[in-house]
Amino acid sequence: MNDKDREFDLAIKRDYKVTEDNQLAQQRYISRRSKGKAPTLSEEKAFAYIVSRIKPTDTELKPIEFDIKEFCDICGFTAKQYYSHVKDTLSRLMARQVWIQTDDGKEDGYPYLIHVGLDDGKGKGTVDIHPNLAPFLLQLKGNYYQFTFHNILAMKSAYGIRLYKLLKSLYYKNTEIEFDLETLKGHLDCIGKHKEYYNFKRKVLIPALHDINTYSDLKVEMEPRKTGKFITSLIFHIVDLTREGMPEDIAAANERYRNVEREINPDQMTFEKIFAGIGDYP
């Protein structure tokens, strides 16, 4: 495969769909222990990559096989030591827990991954998602959200990815979503952090909204609400640029895609060279 074909193949795989049950995006993180905390930026992207490899026709979770260098190139990981970077990231996903609320109001915790196999000599890897997550990833008929993988790849803040997925999972109900501050902090893994609203806004919300508005298919504006002198809730006004009836301008869509490519693909072939002669994309 020549360079142009390889870069086109990577671009296509960055355009795979990530489909999950809404519960996975709407988790609340209330523990300060590592297992009770949300995934890091690298872990968020890695798990999204893994989920994007699940086929819509799959009826059971199968081992996901991948090329280690391709994994890093698709996700925009620039570490010189591909093997150690992937090993560290996937090891943390085996230790990290996802919490699922049961019908009786209880919560069950499962690791994202139950097995990681890496072969440095061949440059290949295999991962197994915890089987109890199958109902939240396979054959979803309702109560799920979906996004194209490249929407999160250039994000520099894990808060941006968490907020993006949270808003995506709730957007189908309405275009204005209100959270009280403590509930939102729980969703973003900020319980006990940034107690003053100014710090929460500066360190979490502004970077997250910058990522979403620059790289994703959502345009989001935030409106604070006060109770007395204090800000106690936030309203997010959302426009989904890909939603039926609200088509995004082709030039704007192409520029948004270029923004992602510039961030995750700075040393590889340019967007124009990859898609030369193929037409506008996406």
Image: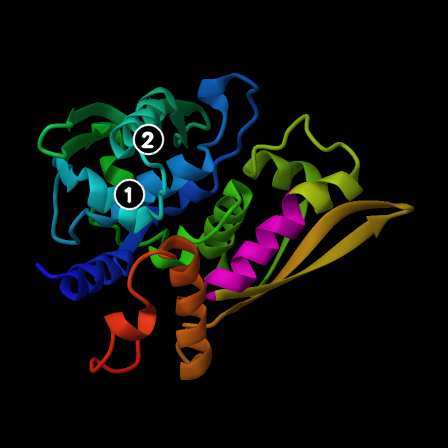
Q: Nearer the viewer, residue 88 or 23?
A: 88
- Give the SS element for disc 2: helix
* 91 drawn magenta: no
Residue range (magenta): 204-217
- Which residue ends up furthest to the right in the rendered image? 229
For residue 43, what is the image quadrant?
top left
- Above or below — where is 169 with respect to 89? below
Q: Residues within 10 Å of mark 1 (few under 14, many from 20)?
A: some
Point out the tag, 2 or 1, that comes first from the N-terminus.
1
- Above or below — where is 88 with respect to 134? above
Q: Residue at x 20, y 49 (%)?
A: 139
Q: Nearer the viewer, residue 58 or 201?
A: 201
Q: Residue at x 91, y 47 (%)?
A: 228
Callout 1 amino acid: Cys
Residue at the spot of label 2? 85
Tell me the chief SS of the magenta region. helix
Judge from the rendering whether residue 280 lies leftward or rightward of residue 98; answer left or right: left
- Give the SS element for disc 1: helix
Q: CA distance from mark 2 to mark 1?
A: 9 Å
- Above or below — where is 116 with respect to 134? above
Asked whether the beta carbons under mark 2 and mark 1 sit within 8 Å of each other, the answer is: yes
- Above or below — where is 116 with respect to 243? above
Callout 2 amino acid: His
* Residue 85 visible in rendering: yes
Q: Quadrant of the N terminus?
A: bottom left
Q: Residue at x 15, y 28 (%)?
A: 120
Residue at the spot of label 1? 72
